[in-house]
Image (cartoon, rainbow, N blue to C red):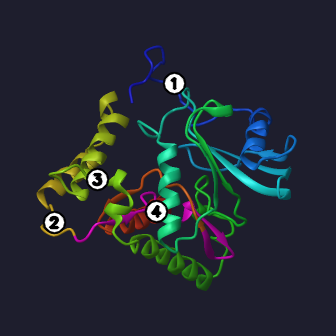
Amino acid sequence: MTAPAERSPTERVKMTVSQRDAPALAQALTDWLAAQVGAAGRPVISNVRMPASGGLSSTSLLFDAEWDGPDGPGRGSFVARMAPEDQAVPVFPRYDLPGQFTLIEQVAARGEVPLPRLRWNQPDGGPLGTAFFVMDQVAGRVPLDNPPYVFGGWLAEASDDDRAALERDSVAVLAQVHAIAEPAAAFPALAPPAGTTALRQHVTGQQDYYRWALAADGLRIPIIERGLDWLEQHWPADPGPDVLCWGDARIGNIIYEGFTPVAVLDWEMAALGPRELDLGWFIFLHRFFQDIA
């Protein structure tokens, strides 16, 4: 991820994915939504906002909508998930939002994973000038990343029993993802090339990501390099069966009703591989937040 030539190496870069104007986006969505729902007139879009907190990899626009459709009045509360802007500091070298829509659609069709209901997919620029898809809003609360949930808030203030229940049910969500049958057939876009394995593809991808995000700009992280070397020296003879791995498996990507998971979000890092990939990431993010606290 080479920095632009004109940027000073001492410049602080704000990690953001959007400078977009929410009302302008809503206005651009109005005619598009009318076509999706077959509305007789222009839908009324209201309560437009962007989440106060959220991930860095994409932009989300929350809005309510009402319309007169062929089957009578309709209404709903929705989320438009958009690819990041060109000027945003990139989190991934490429961002396949239509692929995410297809993957979530297949997960919903093949398992019991709690997911927001998908509505409409716009794989090209469309009215917003970038790929996006729309899904239902899910009521609930999410453990915050910034500041991390271990610093305070509803989860830190909960009882030990409630936190244990949340943890137990969240790990059960991982099991639901991993239980999807025949994942290579269900998600062919994630399958490794011929002659390699899903685990090898995953580790090679992590090596490539390290080079793209850091090493190519001269930022060497010895502990990462030692970790990658250790993996090569201790490669498992039998890594176990491949499953669908959620990828960014952590409680900060789950919406909870009370302490019960009701929606799993953010599938950018989904992959095929041993289930320990998800479990290890899940544990690591807990430890990471706890250690910095």
Residue farthest front in this picture: 70
Closest to the observer, 143 or 31:
31
Q: Is residue 273 magenta?
A: no
First in sequence: mark 4 vs mark 2: 2
Residue farthest top in this picture: 6
Measure the alpha-carbon separation of dots 1 and 2.
43 Å
Specify the amino acid type for callout 4: Ala
Query: Where is mark 2, residue-wise?
Result: 236
First in sequence: mark 1 vs mark 2: 1
Of badges 1 and 2, the one in the foreground is 2
Measure the alpha-carbon separation of dots 4 and 3.
15 Å
Query: Where is mark 4, residue-wise?
Result: 249
Assess whether mark 3 and mark 2 are in contact (beta carbons under 8 angstroms): no
Q: What kind of element bears circle 3?
A: helix
From what the image shows, is residue 162 above or below residue 27?
A: below
Of badges 1 and 3, the one in the foreground is 3
Closest to the observer, 236 or 96:
96
